[in-house]
Image (cartoon, rainbow, N blue to C red):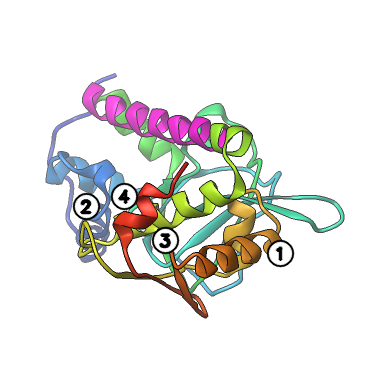
Amino acid sequence: MEISAAPVARTPDIERLSKLLTQAPLFNGLSSNEVARIARGVREVKVPKGEILFHRGDSCTGFHLILSGQIKLAFTSADGNEKVVEILRPGQTFGEAVMFMDKPYVVMAQALTETQLLHIGKQTFFDELAGDPLFCRKIIAGLSQRLHHLMADVESYSLRSGRDRVVGYLLREEEIRQDAPPEGRVSIRLPTSKGTIASRLNLTQEHFSRILHELSSAGLIEVEGRTIHIPDIGRLRTSLG
């Protein structure tokens, strides 16, 4: 079914939501009219720190785009144990795969900080996909990239030592910074608690802290609360097994 290319009526709210949508790489390359059509099915969600956005088993009516803040995706057991699957940041989306499968959520989502999100309604999104093959390819590419990251995680948990997982994590955090220098001294502010990061790396909090202490004793890092100073990022890079 072809979607009409007729201009979308631009209310102030549609204009505002369209501008918010264009902050995400997913919507780069779409025309203003295409973005406005999607904006008709968008609602803004503000989640206080610590609040759970959805639980495992809740129905999925669309997917989310993070505008600011951080979201934790995690499995939880009946006795309250938790395994963090992913820590998501602004510009990232989540929930697409479950939406396409028409299944309930298999993880819970919790705000690690005060978080601003956009919820993109399923039917509006499907209507846009039906009329834009290139947009379909972007969605498939995004899901494929997430699957690639998942496979890399499985490889890391299975084949790499805890020490290498922590070093790899610190290096990735350094790479995320836009002003990060290629060599020399850098400082990294851990985005969330050490316990959450440890779970993400499939480590206990005690093991994670012990590895940080070992790296500190070796002169590779300096720990100051949640700030990690790296005297020589090049030396830390070469220490990776």
The residue that label 3 is drawn on is 117
The one of 38 and 166 positioned closer to us in this rendering: 166
Mark 1 lies on a secondary structure that is helix
Can residue 53 be seen here?
no
Rounded to the nearest whole Å, what is the CA distance between mark 4 and mark 2?
A: 14 Å
Rounded to the nearest whole Å, what is the CA distance between mark 1 and mark 2?
A: 41 Å
Amino acid tagged 4:
Arg
Amino acid tagged 1:
Glu
Residue at the location (65% across, 46% down)? 107
Q: Which residues are magenta?
A: 132-154
Q: Return the disc, 4 or 2, that comes first in the chain's sequence.
A: 2
**Direction from residue 213 to residue 237 in the image, left or right:** left
Tag on residue 25? Answer: none
Amino acid tagged 2:
Thr
Few, some or many C-alpha atoms within 10 Å of disc 2 (few <14, some 14-19, many ≥20)?
A: some
Q: Quadrant of residue 51?
A: bottom right
Residue at the location (87% across, 56% down)? 79
On the image, the x and y values in percent for residue 202 come to 65, 48
Q: Are marks 4 and 2 in contact (CB under 8 Å)?
A: no
Depth check, mark 1 against mark 4: the one in front is: 1
Few, some or many C-alpha atoms within 10 Å of disc 4 (few <14, some 14-19, many ≥20)?
A: many
Q: Are marks 2 and 3 in contact (CB under 8 Å)?
A: no
Q: Relative to 181, does residue 73 appear above or below in the rendering?
A: above
The residue that label 2 is drawn on is 22
The one of 93 and 169 positioned closer to us in this rendering: 169
The residue that label 4 is drawn on is 40
Q: Return the disc, 1 or 4, that comes first in the chain's sequence.
A: 4
The residue that label 1 is drawn on is 206
